Every structure is written in structure tokens, then in C-alpha cells.
Image (cartoon, rainbow, N blue to C red):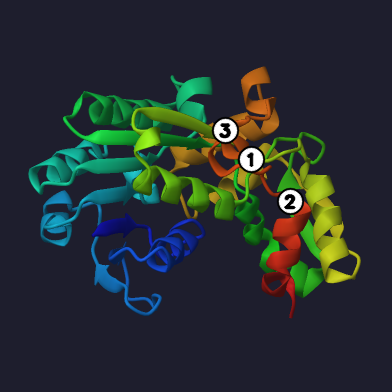
């Protein structure tokens, strides 16, 4: 059995389906009740209570670990999840980390993730670590303003990053869970192109077939909105990368192509596939 945490999100949902389609027994874990593919067991559990996860992990051979937003806070203890997995007899953990653990290791939330990576490496488990950059699906934050006003409001309109399609992350995660060759691997996951928020807006407009206007927010305005759904420290760390990416964050990684044997998907493909989310 393979346990997938964050199983109803933009990565966990396609990962759960991919594993089920591969004939694996899958337990999908999310904080709230949710629909899952046929044959998949769903369990509601809160990762902030690691002990509560132990019964879910009983009999599992592998775990995909995706932290909820509150577990990125500096006072969180996500390393307890690794210890619980080890105690439950899990053999392999694939951790969704972040590119910032390498490129900005001293950021407040990156310190937490880097410590979690170290705990996993030092455990007796088989492991793989995925370090994605920004997600294409983060543009879903714009969906309501596009639907209501035909506007994207975002900071740093002309600063680009090689954002990654969550479906590609899910495919790499499935490979790491199922294939021994990824044991001990650290994969940096990016898209195939550097693309700015203004260019993402143009791609969404093309997918919709209707004009979408771009409105640039200040950093302070953006932080106020982001802090409604994530710790303020995580919002600050994220905005620092969005506004002034360093050379490592601008680099296009070969790892998706090396794992999957194909190039990563472009943002325009993600936009076309998810266009319904931006329509009335």
C-alpha cells in the first residue's frame, strides 16, 4: 500500500490516480472528506497531529509526504512525521520539498524544510526528495478576479521564473515511489521556460479566447492577500523569490526529462487544460 498525503490537491490528486491506474493499493489522506478514484481508500487526518497518522500508515510500504501550509511555520515539528512513518514500518518516503531549500536555505520556512530533508536522509528509510520551483497552479489564485473583472492582479509583472506543472510533479513522484533507481535522489523540478506573470496572463487570455488585463500589485498588497491562506513567513519567503530570483532559481532543470523521458509541460498547456477554472 502507498499512502499519499495532500491527496486532494493539485499534486496529490493526479498522483493518487496514477498510482491507482498502475495497480497499486492507495490510501489517500486529506484534512477533510473528499472524492477519490474507485478502489482508493480515503482517510481524513491532520498532519499537524503526527500520532494520528500512525494507524493510517500501518501496512504501508511507501509514503508521499506533502506538508500542509501550517507545517511550514518556524515552530512546526514536521520531522515527527518521518519518525512516525519509520515506527509504522514504512520503507520509502518521497518528500515534496521546495527548490528554496537549496537556493535560499536561510529563509525562515526554508530552515524548517531543510531540517526535514536532513531528518529523512538520516533515517533508516529509503527516500527521494523533490524540489519544485513555483507551480503553474498558483495562478488559480487569479481565477476569481479573471471571472469577475477580467483582471489578473499580481506583483512583479515582468519578473519570470520557470514554473512547473503540478501534473509533472505528480508523475515524477509516482516514479520515485515505484522505482528503486530514485532511492537517494534529489530532483529539482522546473518548467521548460522562464515566464513572467504578465506572460502567464497572456497565455490564460489565449486559452479563454477573451482579453485579460494585468494589474501589478505592490509587494505589500500581495503579502496581505497571501497571508490570508499561508503563514506570513512563507508569504515573505515566496515574495522574495518572485521579486528577485537568483541564477539557480532561473535555471531550467533537466530532472523532469531525465525521470520521465520527455520535456516538462509548458504553462500554456497547463492553462488550456485548466481553462474551465477561469470561466464564469
Q: Position of residue 175 (x, y in %)?
A: 44, 46
Alpha carbon distance from label 3 to label 2: 17 Å
Mark 2 nearby-residue class (10 Å; few <14, some 14–19, many ≥20): many
Position of residue 211 in the picture relative to residue 158 (left or right): right
Residue 105 in which image quadrant = top left
Against 214, residue 242 (above or below) is above
Q: Nearer the viewer, mark 3 or mark 2?
A: 3
Does residue 104 appear in the picture of this structure? Answer: no
Residue occupied by mark 3: 255
The structure residue drawn at horizontal position 40% and vertical position 61%, both measured from the top left corner, is 19
Q: Position of residue 73 (x, y in %)?
A: 35, 39
Residue 127 in which image quadrant = top left
Residue occupied by mark 1: 220
Residue 57 in which image quadrant = bottom left
Q: Position of residue 128 (x, y in %)?
A: 36, 35
Secondary structure, mark 1, is: helix
Q: Nearer the viewer, mark 3 or mark 1?
A: 3
The tag earlier along the polypeptide, 3 or 2, is: 3
Alpha carbon distance from label 3 to label 1: 34 Å
Closer-to-camera residue (157/45): 45
The tag earlier along the polypeptide, 2 or 1, is: 1
Mark 3 nearby-residue class (10 Å; few <14, some 14–19, many ≥20): some
Secondary structure, mark 3, is: helix
Amino acid at each position: 500500500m502507498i499512502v499519499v498525503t495532500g491527496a486532494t490537491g493539485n499534486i496529490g490528486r493526479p498522483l493518487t490516480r496514477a498510482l491507482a491506474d498502475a495497480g497499486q493499493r492507495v490510501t489517500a489522506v486529506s484534512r477533510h472528506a473528499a472524492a477519490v478514484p474507485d478502489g482508493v481508500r480515503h482517510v481524513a487526518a491532520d498532519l499537524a497531529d503526527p500520532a494520528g497518522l500512525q494507524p493510517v500508515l500501518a501496512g504501508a510500504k511507501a509514503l508521499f509526504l506533502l506538508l500542509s501550509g501550517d507545517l511550514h511555520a518556524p515552530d512546526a515539528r514536521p520531522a515527527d512525521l518521518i519518525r512516525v512513518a519509520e515506527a509504522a514500518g514504512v520503507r520509502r518516503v518521497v518528500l515534496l520539498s521546495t527548490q528554496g531549500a537549496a537556493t535560499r536555505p536561510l529563509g525562515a520556512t526554508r530552515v524548517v524544510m531543510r531540517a526535514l530533508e536532513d531528518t529523512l536522509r538520516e533515517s533508516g528509510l529509503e527516500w527521494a526528495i523533490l524540489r519544485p520551483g513555483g507551480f503553474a497552479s498558483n495562478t488559480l489564485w487569479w481565477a476569481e478576479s479573471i471571472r469577475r473583472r477580467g483582471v489578473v492582479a499580481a506583483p512583479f509583472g515582468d519578473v519570470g521564473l520557470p514554473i512547473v506543472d503540478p501534473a509533472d510533479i505528480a508523475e515524477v513522484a509516482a516514479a520515485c515511489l515505484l522505482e528503486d533507481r530514485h532511492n537517494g535522489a534529489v530532483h529539482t523540478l522546473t518548467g521548460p521556460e522562464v515566464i513572467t506573470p504578465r506572460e502567464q496572463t497572456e497565455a490564460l487570455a489565449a486559452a479563454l479566447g477573451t482579453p485579460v488585463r494585468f494589474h501589478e500589485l505592490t509587494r505589500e498588497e500581495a503579502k496581505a492577500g497571501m497571508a490570508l491562506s499561508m503563514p506570513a513567513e512563507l508569504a515573505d519567503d515566496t515574495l522574495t523569490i518572485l521579486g528577485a530570483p537568483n541564477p539557480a532559481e532561473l535555471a531550467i532543470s533537466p530532472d523532469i526529462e531525465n525521470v520521465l523521458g520527455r520535456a516538462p509541460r509548458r504553462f500554456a498547456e497547463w492553462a488550456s487544460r485548466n481553462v474551465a477554472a477561469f470561466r464564469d
